[in-house]
Image (tube, rainbow, N blue to C red):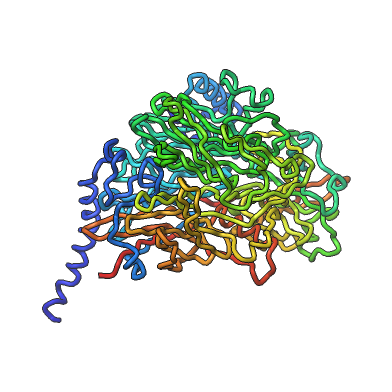
Amino acid sequence: MSKKLPWAPLGTVLATLLAPLSASADMANYSPVTDARLISPEPQNWLMYRGNYAGWGYSALDQINVDNVGKLTPAWEFSTGMSEGHQAPPLVNNGIMFITTPNNQAIALDAKSGKEIWRYKKQIPDELQQLHPTNRGLALFNDNAYLATTDAFLVALDAKTGKEKWKTAVADWKSGYYMTLQPLVASGKIIVGCSGGEYGIRGFIAAFDAQTGKEIWRTYTVAGPGDPNAGSWPTGKYATGGGSVWITGSYDPKEKLTYWGIGNAGPWMGDTRPGDNLYANSVLALDVDTGKMKGYHQYHHNDSWDWDEVSAPLLIDIERNGKKIPSLVHAGRNGYLWWLDRDQKGKNDIGFVDAWPYVEQNVFTKIDPKTGRPTYDPTKVPATNKTTTYCPSLWGGKDWPPEAYNPKTGLFYIPAQNNLCAELTGEPVKYKAGDLYIGVPLQGILTNVRMTEKAKDHIGEVQAWDISKKKLVWQHNYQYMNWGPLMTTAGNLVFGGGTNDRKFHAFDATTGKLLWEFPTNSGVIGVPSTFEIDGEQYVAVQSGWGVDAERMQGAFNAVLPPEQKNTVPQGGVVWVFKLPK
Amino acid sequence: MNDLQETPPARSTVDAPSCEQRRQALKIAVIGMAGLGLLRHVDASFADEATDKRPQPGDRLVDINGDLAKPLKADDIKLASKPILAFPFDPATKKARDGSRLNKLLLIKLDATVMNVETKARSAAGVLAFSAICTHQGCDVSEFLPEDKNLLCFCHFSKYDPLADGAVTAGPAPRNLPTLALQEDNGELVVAGLLSSAPGAKTNT
């Protein structure tokens, strides 16, 4: 003891001095994220929103698998210091983890220890209202990290230091434009889209030069003058027609086409804007270099249900009648599972293959087998000064949380909400810049939820589909909601949170058997990721309840008896799990 | 890059252009930059201008969705009905203080006989005034729920009790909705004090 004592303070000093050096040493060896790496991401890293451009949410890592996942244990946790919805996947690039939090913060961490390396805080205007206080992550490219903010800025950060390199105003936040999505990096461009349909924006997708922030192209999601589909809107309505973009597009680097899900038209009631209202509630195929629209498919026309089709479709090759179809697959907020052909007639146009309901849906009476256009039951179409009940609810069969695809099982996994309906009444509304432009009494949204008899059994579901056979292979039920983005791995596992009991779950990807669950600090609505360092596989996710999951809980609390009401605690924490040694 | 700065410009007491001159210059600059496709975010909140000032004692109130030159009377507010969103109105300049959305106020008329002494003292003919900006994430508090007599913010369903100093009764809001005392002058609603605390959310940490 007496010999060691004099060295103890020196050791502390050395450790203090070396800690930042160690962090910067890691950063000195930072691996630039190139186009080639994004096209073929290495399994040990998680470089983008869904792990690959096809949007699969899949990892080829298999050290953690069905045989040992039951032993999964926390490796480290990190409190972000923020409340609200923590939805960003922990991105990992050769030992460096990047996360974002609500209120436009970005953090770099040592992925093995959880030690903070840097933190960036975008200052938020005092007058900004944040309807969706969340962020879905940084985009990594070369030595930069890109953040899209709720005051509608695109910010380029030095990935090594967190210092701001440039920022570009993508749109005017005072008119209701905002961003929560992770930008897409493709072909040297940073591509984003804007939300704000509730405030009467005109949605768009825009690409910016990765080095300078200069805008390269902008394609509107609401057809206006000069667009061949401008006639799908009453005169002048395009300017406030909504068509928000919420979620990162998927990308086919071979064809250089990027696919985006588009939100609903505004205001909510379809009778205020007669017509199909293109390109609301659609998927768009855009040329990544020019922004030119190469194809589109509208999932449903003249929306009155707030079913914005926020998620981008997954790119999957699926066999049909012995022929491989380069497909787009999307679990619609409208409650139908959509199977589209992304190379119809060899022209990169989008064609319809098939669609069927995956949750209780009582609005569509039929789907045109050639075009996929639905026919509506007129008694289930909300309108101004008319009260209508319809299923699924305004949060849909699936809202923003992403599906996953596992090439080893061939199954497509959906985080679904079932047995929920909504009652809405439309009211006249006038546009005023920056104010809500919905056309539905706001207290009616609080009390919109109608639970069906089957909701007594369950509401949340994790579904596994064999798309080629139109077959539901397995389903796991949760008593209440499921707001959990899914990830699947070569270890034959499916991971997801989403429940109001704070748990993060792992399932057998083939059978759906629940193999592991862990109660975190808050509700898990984050996108999971997995990575490997020094031969060890880790699974990471942010826990931090908020935004629409919290809003749905509020709507449940408005209709449930007191003993079933619930308040999910808030506060963001990064959880990283691994197997014990 | 050609970003305009995000914070208000530094003030000088010597040879400084007037606020109006500054505002005009800024407008010209913004219009010019917009023409060049260079428009960037502008957050110049000239908080000492009459239209940007928070509600002041003696201010009248005007309906945000009505006539911004016509002061509201207590009789214009219907008992326990959908709240009126209002801006303060400076009687000296005859202008609404509409330069900042943080100046938005919520007016609700409730039965004065059920108010406690403090609440009644803040009311004018049963009309109570609050900041209309949710303390959670800055959205408009615009609804009144007659069933539980609470004010509601649509964004994340925070609820406030107008009869208990704007206390949070449900949802994620971290603090009370700021209150504003009123009095009556020949039937017109008049601001009788300052907001009980700063309006809006505190999202920068």
Q: How many marks?
A: 0
Whether residue A521 is visible to the viewer of this picture, yes or no, is yes
Outermost residue, left side: A3
Whether residue A175 is visible to the viewer of this picture, yes or no, is no
Identify which residue is drawn at 64% across, 69% down: A564
Identify which residue is drawn at 78% across, 60% down: B147
Outermost residue, bottom side: A1
Q: Position of residue A391 (x, y in %)?
A: 66, 50
On-image quarter of the N terminus of chain B:
top left
Identify which residue is drawn at 37% across, 30% down: A256
Report whether B199 appears left or right of A141: right
Q: Quadrant of residue A528?
A: bottom left
Q: Nearer the viewer, residue B20 or A255?
A: A255
Q: Position of residue A7 (x, y in %)?
A: 15, 71
Q: Nearer the viewer, residue B65 or A368?
A: A368
Report whether A504 appears left or right of A336: left
Q: Position of residue A6 (x, y in %)?
A: 15, 74
The answer to whether residue A225 is above or below residue A515 is: above
Report whether A313 appears left or right of A34: right
Report whether A190 appears left or right of B47: left
Identify which residue is drawn at 52% across, 67% down: A501
The answer to whether residue A101 is above or below residue A71 is: above
The answer to whether residue A563 is above or below residue A382 is: below
The answer to whether residue A348 is above or below residue A418 is: above
Q: Position of residue B26 (x, y in %)?
A: 54, 26
